[in-house]
Amino acid sequence: MMDILRAARSLQLPDWWVCAGFVRSKIWDTLHEYEERTPLSDIDVIYFDASNVNEDIEKRLEEQLLQIMPNLPWSVKNQARMHVLNDNPPYSSSTDAMSKFPETATALGVRLDDQDHVQLAAPCGIDDVLQIFIRPTPYFLENKHLAAIYDKRIVQKNFKGKWNKVTVIRD
């Protein structure tokens, strides 16, 4: 994980984080006492740069990461443009964007400072990830039209099948 964080840091992106399943899955694998890490469908690197929202830059950044660590499923997204794809009001930062993720346990990000200290962003707190709960973020609860997206992700991500201690909450 530290090598992945160092690779992401090397891009020198503004307001960058490695987030979502990268963080949640490691915590749940540990809480389930798995000896091997659950495979990741992608490694989400997010950043916030309102001065340049060209999607082509994200693809070039993914290529740079592949040069550093080949064969990893890198995904780089500028959160300054993602509100358009998600039909949301503009985000103010990467942490603001994380707070709009579907599940509280996935609304997590980590990064390294210059001294290799891990920093955590948890706009919805860490209680749910530590208690192994999947529940909608406050943003998804406030916007009932997002319930179908949440329900679809519960099925697609197969949380309960991967981590049998997961409690799914559909508030």
Image (tube, rainbow, N blue to C red):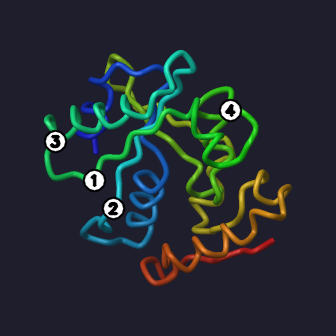
Q: Earlier in the sequence, mark 4 or mark 1?
A: 1
Measure the alpha-carbon separation of dots 3 and 1.
Answer: 10 Å
Which residue, given by chain and number where applicable, does mark 1 sit on? 73
Measure the alpha-carbon separation of dots 2 and 3.
Answer: 15 Å
Find out whether the residues at labels 1 and 2 contact each other: C-beta distance under 8 Å. Answer: yes
Number of residues whose C-alpha sits closer than 10 Å to that of mark 1, classed few (under 14), some (14–19) or many (20 or more): some
Which residue sits at x=75%, y=63%? 146
Q: Residue 21 placed where, x, y %?
A: 45, 57
Q: Secondary structure at mark 2?
A: loop
User: Eyeballing the image, is 13 above or below 39?
Assistant: above
Number of residues whose C-alpha sits closer than 10 Å to that of mark 4, classed few (under 14), some (14–19) or many (20 or more): many
Which residue, given by chain and number where applicable, does mark 3 sit on? 69
Q: Nearer the viewer's eye, disc 1 or disc 2?
A: 1
Report the amino acid beneath label 2. Answer: Leu
Find out whether the residues at labels 3 and 1 contact each other: C-beta distance under 8 Å. Answer: no
| Picture disc at residue 40 | 2
Which residue, given by chain and number where applicable, does mark 4 sit on? 91
